[in-house]
Image: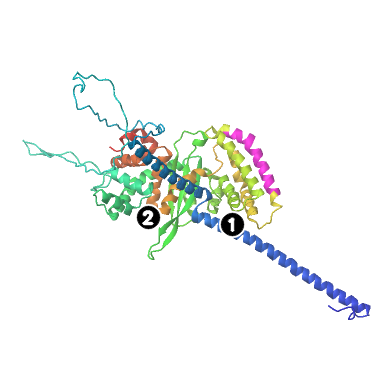
Amino acid sequence: MPTHAALPDDIDALKAMIRERDAAILARDEVLESLRDELSTRKVEIEQLKLFIAKLKRMQFGRKSEKLDRQIEQLELKLEDLQADEEESAAEMEQRGRVVRARPERKPLPPHLPRVEKVYTPEATTCTECGGALRHLGDDISEQLEFIPASFKVIRHIRPKLACNCCDCIMQAPAPSRPIERGMAGPGLLAHVLVSKFADHLPLYRQSVIYAREGVELSRSLLADWVGASSNLLRPLVDAVRRHVMAGPKLHADDTPVPVLAPGNGKTKTGRLWTYVRDDRPSGATIPPAVWFAYTPDRKGIHPQTHLIPFTGILQADAYAGFNAVYETGRIHEAACWAHARRKFFDLHDARPSAVTTEALRRIGELYVIEANIRGTPPDERLSTRRARSRPLLDDLETWMRSTMTTLSRKSDTTAAIMYALNLWPALIRYCDDGIIEIDNSAAERALRGIAIGRRNYLFAGADSGGERAAAIYTLIGTAKLNGIDPEAYLRHVLTNIADHPVNRVDEFLPWNVATCLPKPADLSS
């Protein structure tokens, strides 16, 4: 920059210098503005990375609520130790003759449990004081809870051969049918293996070790053969559940990734397990609920489109693009999930609370309070309440979201959460136009929880065929649970009778049709 002494006296030259200076300042301002934009973009990226890292940590270590559960478990363990110490001290004080505080009153033992009575009479038959006769004065009765480990037993099927004295004709009763032809496993054992693997998440190799402790050697390969044969026998019943599910006016759908062994290279690939739930009990329906699972080797949209060919009605699901093709047919109408929309704001709020996320969660929470009050009521009553109370709140929520979005950066995660809801808005508010629709897709998410637990315990399947078998058994176990039926007792009953049952009457084995035939809890061990 020239000094005063270096400035020219010529006016035109001075004007040229001023123009040059202005151009330099303008160029510098443009660079500064560019740097500001770049800085702002980097700040947004940093915040996005922080949020992503927080999400990854929750995926690795569990959500905050799950951390709280673990803390509660630790405190419960500490409480158990303290109570054990207290009991040990109390026993020691009793031995020393000291007074011990009264113990809290215990709940009575369940009345359905079988009782084994043991009567303890005095050894003496006459009075030890005077030798007089004794009469019955009363009884002191106390109860003790005992556990009898599960045990094996061998059932010998004996068929006597009878010969005629006149013509040497031989007569014999026909052999009873077995779930697996010429197999040694009874229906109760098969049911136990299936439920242990698919409901209690015990892989077959662990079951083999457990059975060996009972002195029964059942190899992993033998157990696998039983699972395959049982799945094949139950296939018609699984198809009957699918027909019942697809006949409903509304379905809940969701999917989850499952690790499957890829053929050839020994590595794992990601398959998908789809769930379709029919459950209209929240709207007062009495039709039995059911769930159908399907396995696919990938997540291509053609799979749910194929699954839903026989269905017509309302589909409650997330915003998965693979469902779009079924919505375009006009046979199926989309109802979005408010739990998914809420989760977007919850994740943000969990990572870094803000006034916007707090307000969004509060407003959505008001909608759920209304739903809690009308759960189980008829569709027309639910519809009337939603139109009177929920719809005004939804209209206000949409207005608030749109006005709030104008104050936020277009690249922010909060804007993305709002846009997710607004893009699905017609589907999100559809539940206010039909009393059978739910506010969210929780029914499908609940159906997948058990699969998520098993997925953490072991490889889901060794091949695609294993995934299909798992989906079949999950269908029967999940449907039994939805109807309040013990899945092991249910499968035992089905496997006992289905081999001789006409396949065109397999609907008679649906859980709600056999509930009265199943043993009471006290008789399950028989």
- Residue at point 65% right, 63% down? 42
Query: Of helix, strand and loop, which one carries label 1?
Result: helix
Residue 407: x, y in percent?
71, 52
- Residue at point 21% right, 20% down? 134
Toward the viewer: 297 or 84?
Answer: 84
Tell me the amino acid under the disc marked 2: Ser
Residue 248: x, y in percent?
48, 40
Which disc number belongs to residue 465? 2
In the image, is residue 383 part of the stretch drawn in magenta? yes
- Residue at point 30% right, 32% down? 114
Query: Of helix, strand and loop, which one carries label 2?
Result: helix
Q: Residues within 10 Å of mark 1 (few under 14, many from 20)?
A: some
In the image, is residue 225 part of the stretch drawn in magenta? no
- Side of 308 where 341 appears, left or right: right
Q: Residues within 10 Å of mark 2 (few under 14, many from 20)?
A: some
Could you tell me if residue 511 is visible in this image? yes
Residue 36: x, y in percent?
72, 65
Alpha carbon distance from label 1 to label 2: 39 Å
Residue occupied by mark 1: 51
Is 133 above or below relative to 106? above
The residues colored magenta run 382-403
Is 181 above or below relative to 20? above
Could you tell me if residue 330 is visible in this image? no
Toward the viewer: 27 or 312?
Answer: 27
- Side of 36 where 463 appears, left or right: left
Prevailing secondary structure class for the magenta stretch in the rendered image? helix
First of labels 1, 2 by sequence position: 1
- Side of 139 where 301 appears, left or right: right
Mark 1 or 2, which is nearer the eye? Answer: 1
Tell me the amino acid under the disc marked 1: Leu
Q: Quadrant of residue 371?
A: top right
Which disc number belongs to residue 387? none
